[in-house]
Image: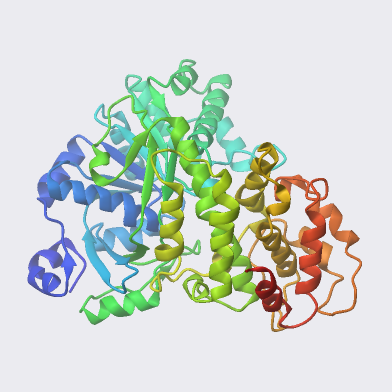
Amino acid sequence: MKLTLEGITAERKAYEAAGYSLPAFDQEAVKGNTLERPLWIHFGAGNIFRAYQANIVQNLLNRGSMDTGLIAAEGYDYEIIEKSLRPHDNLTILATLKADHTVDKTVVGSIMESLILDSHNPKEYSRLKEIFANPSLQMASFTITEKGYAVADPRGNTLPAIAADFEKGPDEPDSYLGKVVSLLYHRYVKGKLPIAMVSMDNCSHNGDKLFSAATAFAQAWCKNGLADEGFLDYVKNPAKVSFPWTMIDKITPRPDARVEKLLSADGMEGLDAVVTSKNTYIAPFVNAEECEYLVIQDAFPNGRPPLEEGGVIFTQRETVDKVEKMKVCTCLNPLHTALAIYGCLLGYTLVSEEMKDPVLKKLVEIIGYREGLPVVVDPGILDPKEFIDQVVNVRIPNPFMPDAPQRIATDTSQKLAIRFGETIKAYQRDPSLDIADLKLIPLVFAGWLRYLMAVDDSGKPFTPSPDPLLEAAGAYVADYSLSDTPKNLDKLDKLLSNETVFGVDLTAIGMAGLVKNYFAEMSQGPGAVRTTLEKYVK
């Protein structure tokens, strides 16, 4: 079976016999409608987009709730379009890996057009300009990673590519953001047409990040006389251009060899994954968990598709913020980070396998239910306890999800403050709670210190995951070895007092001593991590 429009038409019976759900709408009619009056263009044609947003639209098309599809654009790695989408007529196989050991197989055909965001490619760029000049366009959405919105480095210096585009103007920018804002400028020139610019990246206050970037470009271009002076006012006017906040939650690991084998056994051809020249791992299929959440601030100055019929929750900005805090500070991300640290130390390569370990399962249950829930931010539209129930009992244990602690451990130093520090601050604010009751959050901090030693619990060296503070933080534990000899742990105080890393000064609040005691026990020798966990996770 071939993954092309011709293939799914000619071999429809074979697809259906193998259990695949196929597009149930008139492909040609929807494509014609989309080209004539596009509603939604998405930048960042990666796995989560093809597994989630594209599938939402497919379901709405199947039900007749929409009659236009999606336009996908890619501005970083053009090979995603050239080697993955276009050879398969923009079709994708979505393998939904369910906790009951079954796989739902869907051919997603809602992407009607795929384009390369390259200002030096006249054909591609002129088509993108046409789309942005169309009054019908309601939203441009993004999954370009949090780094994609950066206009400056951590010291506040404008990034070289951004600075160059500030000087060049909107005609032929080279940076991703510059190209996006140049299209927005074209929409302004064609009549100051309204649009929603919707970041769907998994980062806090994502709409503000996109707004800040767009404003920086508009300000620079107007100041340098490269854009009409009214463009800045247009970008800042929410009645013309909105930048809604969103919260997205769906685990979509990179395409897994086991899933490829399963699909190949059905008779699917040409599923080989491709590693692009920019090291993007892509395939004609995506594998993802069944659980998904997309909460969006309802701010769309040109209207919007009826995505609520596809399970999207529209609400106020404040509620989006509460949902994001609930997930990131209590109900999911802290549990993931705890499993990532200890999974690496204990030699696990799958998070789902960790949940078969009674001690690790109990660790995340106590962090979530006992230490986190008393101060959880309740958004009102989702129940925090039910969210944790699903995370602990369905999502993380899902044996089909090929998610690794090594992947989740990336950038841990950047995650501890929000994932655990916010809970500690909430305990500080509540006179009825005592920070001394937090026992396992400090155990996670100690586990991270032990992780920085880059030696697992069997005594074998391992390579820690990428982290901007890996070298600097690792220096604090560099002199320690696995030994039961008493250690002078005072050198850890400077790190433990770093509010940027932990969100609070652990020495000032009296938690550093407990963290150091845990660390001392875990570094006594091989097997000490396991022994320490079993001692304190009760």
Quadrant where the image shows the C terminus: bottom right
Identify the residue at horizontal 45%, vertical 31% (top origin).
317
Q: Residue furthest front?
A: 432
* Front-most of residues 288 and 265: 288
Q: Position of residue 122 (x, y in %)?
A: 35, 42
Q: Work out whether 108 lies above or below 72.
A: below
Q: Residue 530 or 494: which is nearer the viewer?
A: 530
The image quarter containing residue 375 is top right
In this rendering, position of residue 168 left or right of residue 185? right
Number of marks present in the image shown: 0
Vertical placement of residue 236 versus 516, above or below: above
| Residue sitting nearer the eye, 57 or 33 | 57
State the image coordinates of residue 389 (x, y, percent, origin top left).
43, 58
Q: Quadrant of residue 252?
A: bottom left
Task: Give the percent coordinates (x, y) of residue 514.
Answer: 78, 60
**Residue at point 15%, 39% (across, down):** 33
**Who's the residue at 74% across and 69% down the image?**
450
Q: How is the image coloured?
A: rainbow
